[in-house]
Amino acid sequence: MYALVDCNSFYANCEKLFRPDLRGKAVVVLSNNDGCVVARSPEAKQLGIKMGVPYFQVKEFCEKNDVTVFSSNYTLYADMSHRVMSTLEKLCPTVEVYSIDEAFLYLADYPTAMTDLNAYGTKLKAIVEQYTGIPVCVGMGSTKTMAKLANYAAKKHPATKGVCVLDNLRWIRRIMQITDVGEVWGVGRRYKVRLNQMGIHTVYQLAICEPAKIRQHFGVVLERTCLELNGQSCLGIEAVEAKKQIISSRSFSTRISCPDELSQAVCSHAAKAANKLRKQDSVCHYLSVFAKNSPFSQTESYTSISGQCQFITPTADTRVMVAAARQILTQIFKKDVRYAKAGVMLFDICQHHEVQPDLFADDSSDNQTNQQSTSKSAEVIAVMDQLNKRYGQNSNQQSAVFIASEGIKDKQSWQMSRDMLSPCYTTNINQLPKVD
């Protein structure tokens, strides 16, 4: 038996959590550079604000209808997600973090839960909301796909009170019959159109299809979905593996043609990528830098630049990566180009303990000096990480300790536009909520 715990309107509820004055009011959260709506509170949905709509199209509507608008505060959302997942891990021994606001729980190894699934689901929901303040819905089923379907029912039907257990054949059939096939996990818009053309409109109609027929028309992935809807588990709990490739990239709020400004952006991305690398206890062999102008520009031709380097010794040292990124950019930079996006990619990644030492390294004093230097470098970076963990980020979302070549954020015109950014309530001691 599987359970899926899904946070309700996660980004919007993270913002509401520290603003009691917004309870019962419409809230929306915008994407990077305040571009479009990516999260809506139930009140905003009732007003008819669509997901993905450009903000400039609904700005006047939001102002007239007293809709509170926030820029994306990823630092806050990541920390609240960590709190939710940590709470779930205390309540169940086997947890798979599926996304920033979703997690699968495998209940077969937890007899306490199996004795009364509905009571356990209710307990899960109550404890997560009590410990974190984030409302969740819980869906349970014999497979992951069934748990997803149960969670959809828990959100859609108020009678479930946020907890739905699909362990009764009569109840399963009823939910399947009233749920559109497009709501099934793994059925996208294209599949839905093709299924509708075959006369399959509900989940139940898909579930009673011959799996072999589904495989013939759609392939093995949808065949597994069909099997899972019939209680045959094809997808187990997956361990979170270290990433084999890390990318830090973002579009600029304004176009950049100055090499110094572009260098600051690239160095900032190199530092972020290095930090991600260390968090999974990894090192990388290669670093790549890329930048480009807008492919949609009508005034200039499309230009894309890129370059890469190989580290003789795999590293996760921010200073080494920033220096390498700067050197690459110096070599590939093109003048008279208004760059719209830049980034850094790390690849050929391995775990720190998997690094193979140089077979031909000798015991000379020079080699011993290099080893000592590497050890000291690791100590310096460890101290840097500890300080940043302790003091968090400043009001401009910049780490307490950073590399000078990243530049100072409040003086960078290219930084992502976030004019309606909320404080980092949980990660910055200077931005803690104040009670008057």
Image (tube, rainbow, N blue to C red):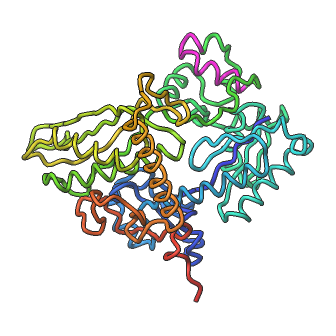
Q: Quadrant of residue 130?
A: bottom right
Tell whether position 26 is magenta: no
Relative to 277, residue 387 above or below: below
Q: Who is closer to the viewer here, 135 or 345? A: 345
Read off the magenta span: 215-229
In this view, the residue farthest toward the right is 115
The percent position of residue 177, horizontal first and vertical second, equals: 70, 33
Q: Quadrant of the N terminus?
A: top right
Residue 17 shown left or right of residue 254 in the figure? right
Q: Residue at position x 46%, y 27% from top?
A: 190
Q: Who is closer to the viewer here, 227 or 3? A: 3
Residue 42 shown left or right of residue 31 in the figure? right
Q: Who is closer to the viewer here, 235 or 214? A: 235
Magenta stretch: helix, strand or loop mostly: helix
Q: How many marks?
A: 0
Relative to 208, residue 417 above or below: below
